[in-house]
C-alpha cells in the first residue's frame, strides 16, 4: 500500500467515524487557535471524555485568548476545578500573557517559538502545529505509539525507543489535510487500536498490521519507575472544620489548599501506626500517613474548611481524597 493510499484510507475512515468533540467544531481561525491551545493543555494527562464538559465550561467563561491573559487566578482555578494537575491552568494563563507580550497576541506557528511558551513541550507544540495551522507534522501521543507498535509488531526495548518510533512514523506519510490527518491517527489509537480488545475488523490499517497477522496484541512499554515519597499530613480539626494551608512548600499543587504536610523518611512511615493513604501523582507515588493527634484541639487558621463545603470551594482532588479517607476512618 502506497503512503498516499494509506493517508487517503485513514482520512476516509476518519471522515466517517470521528467523534464529535467541541474543540473540533468549525469556527473562525482565531477561535480554532484558542480552542486548540486550551484543549491540548487540558488533554495533557487527562482523557477526552473527562475533558469535554470542562472545556465547554472553560471557553464559555473565558471565551478568548485576551480574556485568558487577563483572568484573575480565582476565576481561572474555578474554571479548572476538578481537572487536577493545576499547574497546567497556571501555565495556560502564562502562555496567553506571553503570546501578547512577545508575539503581538498571535499564537506562534513554528515549533521553536511554541516551545518557549510555558507548559508547551515537543508533543503539544507538534499537536498545535498540525491541528491549528495544518502543518505536515504528526504528534506522537500514546495512541499513535500504540498503532505503530502493533502495525510493526515492535517488542524489543530498542524497537520501542523514541528514536525508532519517530523513524517508523514515516510509514504514515503526509497529507494536505495535516490537521485532520494528525487527529485521525490519534483517533484510530483511541477508539480502534485500544490497549485491550482492539477492534481490528474496523481498522483501516488491518491489512498492514503484523500484530493482527500474528494474533498477538500485547503492547510493550518502556520501563518507567515513579519516585516513591513519604509524607505525614497533620489533621487539625475543630468540630467539623479542618485546617488547610496554602501550599508554598512543595512543587506539586503550588498555591493550592492542602493539609499541613511534611516529607518523612521511609522507616518513619513504615513504623507509624497512623492511618495510611496512597495517592499517585504524574511523577511520583505518594504514601501519606494521617496524623490525627491534633483533632479537637482549639486552633485558629486562615483556612478552616467545613467538610460539608468541600465541593463549594476550589480544592485539588488530592485534598478531597484525604477528606474522603477521613470520612471513611473516623
Image (tube, helix red, strand yellow):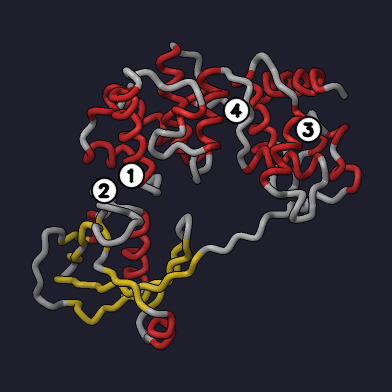
| Residue furthest right as drawn | 213
Considering the numbered disc 1 on the image, is that residue within a helix, a strand or a loop? Answer: loop
* Residue 102 picture location, percent across and down: 32, 24
Q: Mark 4 points at which residue?
A: 19
Query: Looking at the image, which residue is at 78% across and 43% down?
Result: 150
| Category of crowding for the residue at label 1, using alpha-carbon neighbours closer than 10 angstroms: few (below 14), some (14–19), many (at least 20) | some
Q: Where is residue 117 in the image (x, y as percent from the top left)?
A: 39, 33
Residue 131 or 169: which is nearer the viewer? 169
Image quarter of the N terminus: top right
Looking at the image, tell me whether mark 2 or mark 4 is earlier in sequence order: 4
**Mark positioned earlier in the residue sequence (4 or 3):** 4
What is the spatial separation of the Cα atoms under label 2 and label 3, in whole angstroms?
43 Å
- Counting residues from the start of the chain, the first of labels 1 and 3 encountered is 1
Give the residue pinned by disc 1: 81
Q: Which of marks 1 and 4 is nearer the N terminus?
A: 4
How packed is label 2: few (under 14 Cα within 10 Å), some, or many (20 or more)? some
Kindly identify which residue carries mark 2. 314
Residue at the spot 86% in from the left edge and 34% down from the top edge:
208
Is 180 on the left-hand or right-hand side of 268?
right
- Determine the CA span between mark 2 and mark 4: 31 Å
Discs 2, 3 touching: Cβ within 8 Å: no
Q: Distance between the residues labelled 1 and 3?
A: 37 Å
Relative side of 154 to 310, left or right? right
Amino acid at each position: 500500500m502506497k503512503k498516499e493510499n494509506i493517508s487517503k484510507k485513514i482520512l476516509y475512515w476518519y471522515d466517517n467515524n470521528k467523534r464529535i468533540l467541541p474543540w473540533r467544531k468549525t469556527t473562525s481561525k482565531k477561535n480554532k487557535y484558542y480552542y486548540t491551545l486550551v484543549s491540548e493543555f487540558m488533554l495533557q494527562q487527562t482523557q477526552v471524555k473527562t475533558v469535554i464538559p470542562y472545556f465547554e465550561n472553560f471557553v464559555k467563561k473565558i471565551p478568548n485568548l485576551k480574556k485568558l491573559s487577563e483572568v484573575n487566578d480565582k476565576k481561572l482555578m474555578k474554571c479548572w476545578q476538578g481537572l487536577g494537575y493545576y499547574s497546567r491552568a497556571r501555565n495556560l494563563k502564562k502562555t496567553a500573557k506571553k503570546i501578547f507580550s512577545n508575539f503581538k497576541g498571535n499564537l506562534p506557528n513554528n515549533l521553536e517559538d511554541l516551545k518557549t511558551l510555558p507548559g508547551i513541550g515537543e508533543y503539544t507544540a507538534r499537536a498545535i502545529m498540525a491541528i491549528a495551522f495544518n502543518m505536515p507534522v504528526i504528534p506522537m501521543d500514546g495512541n499513535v505509539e500504540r498503532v505503530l507498535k502493533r502495525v510493526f509488531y515492535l517488542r524489543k526495548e530498542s524497537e520501542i525507543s523514541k528514536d525508532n518510533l519517530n523513524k517508523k512514523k514515516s510509514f504514515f506519510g503526509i497529507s494536505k489535510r495535516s490537521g485532520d490527518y494528525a487527529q485521525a491517527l490519534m483517533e484510530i489509537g483511541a477508539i480502534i487500536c485500544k490497549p485491550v480488545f482492539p477492534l481490528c475488523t474496523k481498522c483501516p490499517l488491518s491489512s498492514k498490521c503484523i500484530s493482527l497477522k500474528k494474533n498477538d496484541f500485547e503492547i510493550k512499554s518502556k520501563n518507567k519507575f515513579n519516585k516513591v515519597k513519604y509524607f505525614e499530613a497533620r489533621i487539625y480539626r475543630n468540630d467539623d472544620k479542618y485546617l488547610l494551608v496554602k501550599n508554598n512548600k512543595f512543587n506539586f499543587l503550588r498555591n493550592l489548599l492542602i493539609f499541613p504536610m511534611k516529607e518523612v523518611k521511609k522507616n518513619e512511615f513504615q513504623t507509624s501506626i497512623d492511618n495510611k493513604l496512597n495517592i499517585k501523582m504524574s511523577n511520583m507515588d505518594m504514601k501519606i500517613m494521617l496524623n490525627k493527634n491534633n483533632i479537637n484541639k482549639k486552633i485558629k487558621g486562615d483556612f478552616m474548611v467545613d467538610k460539608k463545603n468541600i465541593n463549594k470551594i476550589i480544592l485539588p482532588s488530592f485534598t478531597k481524597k484525604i477528606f474522603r479517607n477521613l470520612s471513611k476512618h473516623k
